[in-house]
Amino acid sequence: MILTIDIGNTNSFFCVFNGEKLQESFKVPIKSISSSNDILNVFKKSKYLENLNGVIISSVVPEMDKHFKDYFKEKLNKKLIFIDGIINKLDINTKIKKKNSIGADRLVNVCYAKNIYSSPILIVDFGTATTIDYINKKRIYEGGIIAPGIDVSLRSLHQFTAKLPLMNFTKTKFIIGNSTENAIKSGFYWGYISMIEGILKRIKEEKKILPKIILTGGNAHFFRDHINNSILDEFFTMKGLNYIYKEKVIGKK
């Protein structure tokens, strides 16, 4: 069994795979992890921990990495792989000059996508930041966009205003809101729908492509009905980590 971990700026996402089959998944706020002992508490309810053959991690929070290294290597003695340490094994051809500057989660998504889908491909990931990555017809990763994430933007609006309440991102039927709360909900829902639709349209026009579009991340399900021919997979990054461990780390068996 393989444990995949995606350490993000807001949450850490954990999945256990037995081959291709997802056995277990859970999410933990990043602020709740400040030591290796906190990670121990995370796994108290897991029934698969002792059966793990390896652990692979994508992380965009370097200060968190030591806690995970301490726990898995020193306390559990499990083989631990960080994506940042195996970038050269991912076989990603890219036009990005500084390959080491690419977020580990984005590298995982690109590596996995180009190995299971025909190109061109656009990967839209709704995480702490909203990212779109583009793999062209020649299977080269050209780059993408990074925009403010939905939940971060909602918290910022509340934090930096005196009276506007903190709202959850929800689907709304009408564009014009008849209250402050409804106006915020509408502004964010239809604002992000319009942003994603508009950016994807401009990419298609600029690159003259009809790409496969993959939607992933916590809020991805809100966008499926608005983006034609899209593929929704909330576990895409985690499946990518599992794929990389099997194919790029230990090789096919």
Image (spheres, rainbow, N blue to C red):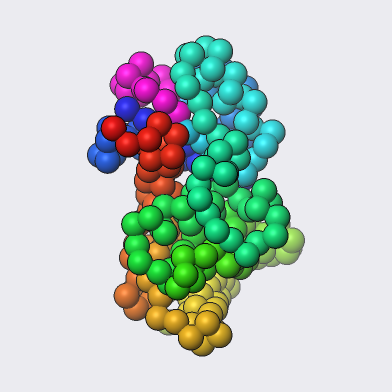
Corner quadrant of residue 149: bottom right
Q: Quadrant of the N terminus?
A: top left
Q: Compared to 27, does 40 lie above or below?
A: above
Q: Position of residue 102 (x, y in %)?
A: 63, 53
- Name the residue at 54% across, 17% down: 73
Residue in front for this viewpoint, 32 or 167: 32
Q: Position of residue 136 (x, y in %)?
A: 49, 71
Residue 124 part of the magenta-drawn span: no
Q: Compared to 178, does 81 lie above or below?
A: above
User: Is 116 positioned to the left or the right of 127 in the image?
Assistant: left
Q: Position of residue 119 (x, y in %)?
A: 40, 69
Residue in front for this viewpoint, 129 or 244: 244
Corner quadrant of residue 60: top right
Q: Position of residue 74 (x, y in %)?
A: 56, 13
Residue in front for this viewpoint, 40 or 173: 40
Residue 45 part of the magenta-drawn span: yes
Q: Compared to 92, does 246 lie above or below?
A: above
Q: Quadrant of the C terminus?
A: top left
- Name the residue at 46% across, 65% down: 139
Dominant secondary structure, magenta = loop
User: Is 240 positioned to the left or the right of 149 in the image?
Assistant: left
User: Is 250 positioned to the left or the right of 84 in the image?
Assistant: left
- Look at the image and give the residue range highlighted in magenta: 43-55
